[in-house]
């Protein structure tokens, strides 16, 4: 039996990665950095799927990662396009400057 | 017969409807002629019906109205001698009043509305007089109430007049409530609204139920006939045009209450208790109104109180078990009272809208055309011997006197005293207005009135003078009306009093009336407005009855309503809702602070919410 990373290690690493991504998305005001934070969080979730697939020896988890990567890619594509457009319209990519949604 | 009676009802209804719908488009003359034709036509039909079968008792159905299962209410009439005479009187008097109105309202621009209501008024009264189904009667009953409201408040731009109309409406409505209850009970006991059926099967009622019915119907009659304690609307009803007063007092409305009791006599007759209360109401009202009439200065108010008093005799007649006497008095009253009101209308217009009798005077010289008919009316009202009013009143008094129950002797005494007071108040008014006096009117203070208005008085005067012939107590044509009405259930042709009692009462009555008349002449041939001294105020306000109602019922009611309105509704319910809504508003504006439009805040909240959900999940996990 090959050397196997324990599942708990994978979970801890994923949690750290998720928190880093969350803090990045929350603390930064730059739209690109927020988008990157969200990507990092998605990757953390994907990591948990990989770990779980290995833990239970099932391929479903890996299949899910493929989906997550596809979603993340399209998200980034659309997100970056939106950011670019917003930058053209308003001249800024600082998230706090956008106040059209103020109630 | 069915067709004749149907057309009879259709005439005034059509007149009213035509005037209501296209009256404004027609020339004034046409509109007036339509209104008069509506009633005169009804009179002709009533006369034809009377000639063809006034002595029969017929139940005729026009067509069905409501039909549900076994229940059916139809537009049907119960034509018996009582109704035959009643509609003859109603249509005759109304016809004269309509014609008189043409002259009386000659300067009023709102004649279309006036004639429309006048026609509908007569129609409603004819429905009451004829209808067999009590539901149909109720229709007419409410119709009369509405038309009286509309006509009393005819000059509605004057607030007092409009309020008088409202007062009449509300007070008669208070009376009508029990008529509605009686209707429901009738249906419960008889499964029918038919008057004929109810009268025929009245004996199946227990005495207690008969008493209940008697009292309910009496209360309804009190409202319409302005008996104590619901009298107060009638004096105020003088706000309407004078022909309307004549119509309300003589032909329609006021007599409806007494007539209803006569129509349902077999039911109320079963209960001695109810009869006693009815008689007592009549007697006391008679005296009460006589006292009140003593001190009035408005010529129409004297007549209004005299009506209350005279209707009291009709009710007393019913209560004494002799509705024929009551009906006889109803007839003679309608003749002399319409005569007096129409005469008063002439006087008022001639004196330039002056109602105060102490500002008249000298009218015998100045208005001879009014003087003689008016004198006949006054004599009839005061029961001058052998005139119609005397004979009918005498019959009522005699029926009361010979009633076996001892308390009726007291009622008789009260009514007799009232009869003498009638002489006093009638001729106080008459002498003050008509006799010569230095401070009275002069010829140039009299405005000319149309000839038609005085001519109309004569047929009524002749009838008021001669209608005693209908029911003479002796002679070859004695008790004519009573014999004619003999087929009506409960009618007594002859009172059966011993000749000595009968003659004694009649002669004593006649003698005392003459004595009091003489005394009145010597006291009131000079105008004496302050004759009653300190009593004047009490009499003038009719024993402060209006004031009492205002302070004991209306004011507390108003105050209660104000509490409900201001404290309960506005300060309680309304404010409660408003404050709750205000609270939500504050809350939502606080929540609104969250939506500051900053993406970072939303993200933070999203994660906080996720954390909270996960925390709950973890804490509730069964490890």
Image: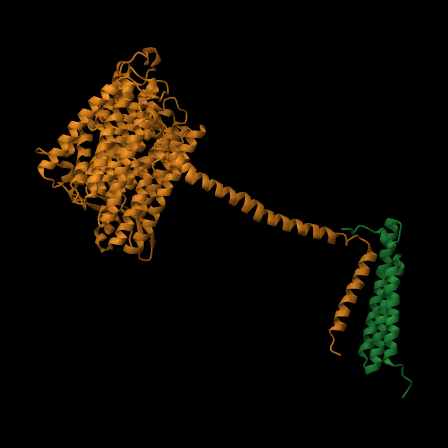
Quarter of the image where one finds residue B470 = top left
Residue B519 at x, y = what percent?
21, 22
Colouring: by chain
Residue A57 at x, y = what percent?
82, 83
Q: In this view, does B213 lie to the left or right of B465?
A: right
Compared with residue B221, is residue B526 higher up or lower down, i.e. above or below? above
Residue B517 at x, y = what percent?
21, 24
Q: In this view, does B10 lie to the left or right of B328?
A: right
Question: Quick one: which residue is furthest to the front in this view?
Answer: B534
> Disc count in the image?
0
Q: Which of B209 and B182 is in front in this view?
A: B209
Compared with residue B232, is residue B601 higher up or lower down, i.e. above or below? below
Question: Quick one: which chain is green?
Answer: A
Q: Looking at the image, can residue B84 be seen?
A: no
Quarter of the image where one finds residue B149 = top left
Q: Chain B is drawn in which colour?
A: orange
Question: Quick one: which residue is furthest to the bottom in this view?
Answer: A1
Q: Which of B153 and B71 is in front in this view?
A: B153
- State the residue at coordinates (66%, 49%): B582
- State the residue at coordinates (91%, 85%): A3
Compared with residue B588, is residue B468 higher up or lower down, i.e. above or below? above
Image quadrant occupied by the C terminus of chain B: bottom right
Residue B239 at x, y = what percent?
38, 29
Q: Nearer the viewer, residue A5 or B411?
A: B411
Q: Which of B362 and B281 is in front in this view?
A: B281
Image quadrant occupied by the N terminus of chain B: top left
Q: Looking at the image, can residue A74 be seen?
A: yes
Q: Is residue B301 left or right of residue B582?
A: left
């Amino acid at each position: 039996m090959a050397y196997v990373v324990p599942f708990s290690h994978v979970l801890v690493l994923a949690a750290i990665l998720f928190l880093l991504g969350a803090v990045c998305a929350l603390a930064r005001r730059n739209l690109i950095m927020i988008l990157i934070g969200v990507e990092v969080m998605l990757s953390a979730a994907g990591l948990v799927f990989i770990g779980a697939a290995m833990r239970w020896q099932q391929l479903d988890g890996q299949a899910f990662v493929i989906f997550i990567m596809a979603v993340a890619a399209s998200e980034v594509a659309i997100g970056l396009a939106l950011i670019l457009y917003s930058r053209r319209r308003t001249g800024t990519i600082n998230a706090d400057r956008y106040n059209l949604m103020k109630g | 017969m069915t067709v004749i009676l149907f057309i009879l009802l259709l005439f005034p209804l059509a007149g009213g409807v035509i005037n209501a719908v296209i009256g404004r488009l027609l020339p004034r003359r046409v509109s007036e002629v339509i209104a008069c034709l509506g009633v005169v036509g009804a009179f002709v039909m009533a006369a034809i019906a009377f000639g063809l079968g006034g002595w029969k008792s017929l139940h005729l159905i026009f067509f069905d109205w409501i039909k549900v299962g076994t229940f059916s209410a139809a537009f049907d009439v119960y034509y018996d001698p009582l109704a035959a005479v009643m509609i003859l009187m109603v249509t005759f008097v109304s016809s004269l009043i309509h014609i008189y109105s043409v002259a009386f309202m000659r300067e009023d621009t709102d004649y279309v509305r006036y004639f429309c209501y006048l026609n509908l008024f007569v129609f409603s009264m004819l429905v009451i007089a004829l209808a067999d189904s009590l539901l149909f009667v109720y229709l007419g009953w409410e119709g009369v109430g509405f038309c009286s409201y509309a006509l009393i408040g005819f000059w509605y731009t004057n607030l007092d007049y409009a309020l008088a109309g409202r007062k009449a409406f509300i007070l008669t409505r208070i009376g009508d409530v029990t008529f509605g209850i009686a209707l429901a009970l009738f249906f419960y006991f008889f499964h029918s609204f038919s008057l004929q059926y109810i009268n025929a099967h009245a004996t199946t009622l227990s005495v207690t139920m008969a008493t209940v019915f008697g009292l309910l119907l009496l209360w309804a009659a009190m409202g319409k006939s302005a008996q104590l304690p619901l009298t107060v609307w009638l004096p105020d009803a003088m706000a309407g045009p004078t022909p309307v007063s004549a119509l309300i007092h003589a032909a329609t409305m006021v007599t409806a209450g007494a007539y209803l009791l006569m129509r349902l006599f077999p039911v109320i007759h079963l209960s001695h208790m109810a009869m006693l209360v009815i008689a007592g109401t009549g007697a006391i009202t008679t005296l009460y109104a006589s006292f009140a009439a003593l001190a009035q200065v408005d010529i129409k108010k004297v007549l209004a109180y005299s009506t209350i008093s005279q209707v009291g005799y009709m009710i007393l007649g019913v209560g004494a078990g002799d509705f024929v006497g009551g009906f006889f008095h109803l007839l003679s009253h309608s003749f002399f009272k319409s005569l007096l009101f129409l005469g008063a209308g002439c006087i008022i217009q001639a004196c330039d809208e002056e109602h105060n009798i102490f500002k008249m005077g000298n009218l015998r010289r100045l208005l001879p055309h009014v003087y003689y008919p008016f004198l006949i009316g006054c004599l009839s009202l005061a029961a001058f011997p052998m005139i119609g009013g005397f004979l009918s009143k005498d019959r009522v008094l005699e029926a009361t006197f010979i009633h076996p129950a001892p308390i009726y002797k007291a009622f008789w005494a009260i009514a007799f005293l009232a009869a003498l007071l009638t002489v006093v108040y009638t001729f106080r008014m008459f002498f003050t207005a008509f006799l010569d006096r230095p401070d009275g009117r002069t010829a140039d203070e009299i405005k000319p009135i149309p000839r038609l208005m005085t001519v109309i008085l004569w047929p009524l005067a002749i009838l008021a003078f001669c209608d005693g012939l209908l029911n003479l107590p002796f002679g070859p044509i004695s008790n004519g009306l009573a014999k004619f009405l003999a087929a009506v259930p409960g009618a007594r042709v002859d009172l059966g009093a011993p000749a000595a009692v009968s003659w004694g009462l009649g002669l004593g009555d006649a003698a005392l009336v003459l004595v009091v008349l003489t005394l009145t002449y010597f006291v009131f041939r000079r105008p004496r407005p302050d004759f009653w001294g300190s009593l004047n105020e009490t009499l003038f306000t009719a024993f402060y009855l209006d004031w009492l109602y205002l302070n004991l019922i209306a004011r507390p009611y108003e105050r209660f309503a104000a509490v409900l309105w201001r404290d309960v509704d506005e300060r309680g319910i309304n404010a409660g809702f408003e404050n709750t809504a205000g609270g939500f508003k504050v809350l939502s504006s606080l929540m609104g602070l969250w939506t500051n439009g900053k993406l970072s805040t939303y993200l933070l909240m999203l994660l906080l919410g996720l954390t909270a959900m996960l925390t709950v999940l973890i804490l509730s996990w069964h490890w």
